[in-house]
Image: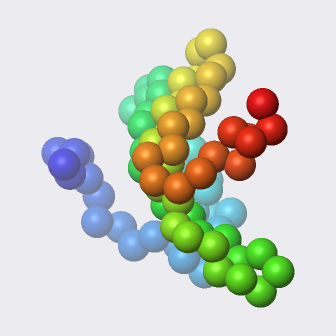
Amino acid sequence: MIPADFSPDPLPAPDPLGFLEKCLEHYAQQRIEGYRLIFQKRERIGGALLPSEVIEVYFRAQPYSVFMRWLRGDCPAWGKW
């Protein structure tokens, strides 16, 4: 869903710090206290491309917390507990 106050300003792709500053500015203006995202990653280890992982992530600023739930793939910490 696109917010009503969405600005079609181009993202500062060649300037990663500018992009981060713009994100933090928007975050503060909107008084965002947390967010949820779906993160997809794929790693190459020792030359081998590993299967894709899909992770649901919840972040909350106060009190600070991050929750990650693997939807597809293996959580690397599971085998260590």
Image coordinates of residue 80 in percent, x first then y, are 80, 38
Relative to 68, residue 13 above or below? below
The colour scheme is rainbow
Side of 66 relative to 57 (left or right):
right
Give me the residue at 54% from left, 76% from top: 13
Give me the residue at 49% from left, 32% from top: 58
Q: Which residue lies furthest to the top in this view?
A: 63
Image coordinates of residue 48 in percent, x first then y, are 71, 83
Give me the residue at 28% from left, 66% from top: 8
Do we see residue 66 in this rendering? yes
Give me the residue at 68% from left, 63% from top: 17
Side of 15 relative to 29 (left or right):
right
Residue 15, image quadrant: bottom right
The foreground one among 33 and 4 is 33
Q: Which residue lies furthest to the bottom in this view?
A: 47
Side of 35 relative to 41 (left or right):
left
Image coordinates of residue 62 in percent, x first then y, are 59, 15
The foreground one among 64 and 44 is 44
Q: In which quarter of the image is the C terminus?
A: top right
Do we see residue 29 in this rendering? no
The foreground one among 12 and 41 is 41
Residue 18, image quadrant: bottom right
Image coordinates of residue 24 in percent, x first then y, are 57, 44
Relative to 66, residue 39 above or below? below
